[in-house]
Each structure stands twice: as C-alpha cells, then as structure tokens.
Image: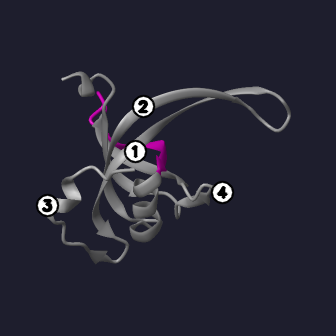
Amino acid sequence: MKNLLNSVRLVGNVGYDPEIREFESGKKLAKLTLATNERVTLLSGDVVNNTQWHRLVAWGAVADRFEKMVKKGSKLMVEGRLQHRSYLDADGQKKETSEVVVKNILLIEAKGKSVQITEDDLQPAGE
C-alpha cells in the first residue's frame, strides 16, 4: 500500500521523439513530454478540449524501452512517481520543475500502427 503514496498513471500521446542521454557508466536517461486530453463541458454547454503537457524522465532499462519503442505521436500509458526539483539555469537563476519519473511504460499504439501487448509488457522493467 505504501507504493500508492506517490503514484502517477497517465495515458496520452508523445509530444516529441525521446531525448536520450548516455553517461560514461553506460546508464541512460530519457526525457520527453506526454499530452493528455480531457473533454470538459462548460456551464454554457460548450465542450472544450483541455490538453495538459507532462514532463517525463526515465532511467536505465525504461529509458532503453523509450529509445527503442517510442516516437513522436505514439500513444502510451506510463506509470511512475511525481518528482519536484529545483536547479540553476545557464544564467544562474533558480528554476523549479515537476516531472513524472517513469517506472513502467505500455505502448498502446506506435505512430501509424497498432502494437500487440503481452503479459510481460505489464511488468515493471528492472534497472
């Protein structure tokens, strides 16, 4: 039950091809964005589409999956945890960001083709 304290699950479309960075140790980092869409009915009766953009990061084997399987436009589900952090930008200014640290991905549809999902795809990838 304690694993549910900081748990995020999103289904959406990838905004751009994953950015992959490989370190000297051989460990990989993947960065990308995911758009989720929700249709909202206003009091006036108008229906609007509410799109939210989420920053995603993944390490190790999960980053490998992003690199091999995911492209801009892919539809996928991600599971992970929400992380808030601060950093200094190039000008020395303190910035803050929130991102989802992805522990598992499920490719629902690659751009232009459907993908069959197996039971193994539902298991978390080890690092």
Find the magenta span and give its range.
42-59
Residue at 44% in and 38% down = 100
- When the figure is inspected, residue 29 is found, relative to residue 16, above or below; the finding is above
The first of marks 2 and 3 along the sequence is 2
Three-letter amino acid code at the position of disc 3 = Glu
Query: Label 2: which residue?
Result: 82
Q: Position of residue 43 (x, y in %)?
A: 29, 27
Horizontally, residue 95 falls left or right of residue 76, namely: right
Which residue was labeled with disc 4? 24
Report the front residue among 72 and 29.
29
Q: CA distance from mark 2 to mark 1?
A: 9 Å
Residue 51 in sight: no
Closer to the camera in the image, 31 or 59: 59
Question: Quick one: quadrant of the N terminus?
Answer: top left
**Distance from the alpha carbon under mark 4 to that under mark 3:** 33 Å
Q: Would you identify the image quadrant in which residue 82 lies?
A: top left
Q: Earlier in the sequence, mark 4 or mark 1?
A: 4
Q: Are marks 4 and 1 in contact (CB under 8 Å)?
A: no
Which label number is shown at residue 102? 1
Residue occupying the point 29% across, 67% down: 109
Q: Residue 84 at x, y = what percent? A: 52, 26
Please say whether residue 41 is visible from this viewpoint.
yes
Which quarter of the picture shows residue 85? Answer: top right
Q: Which residue is labeled 3 in the image?
A: 119
What amino acid type should be assigned to the residue bearing mark 2?
Answer: Leu
Nearer-N-terminus badge (4/3): 4
Q: Which mark is residue 49?
A: none
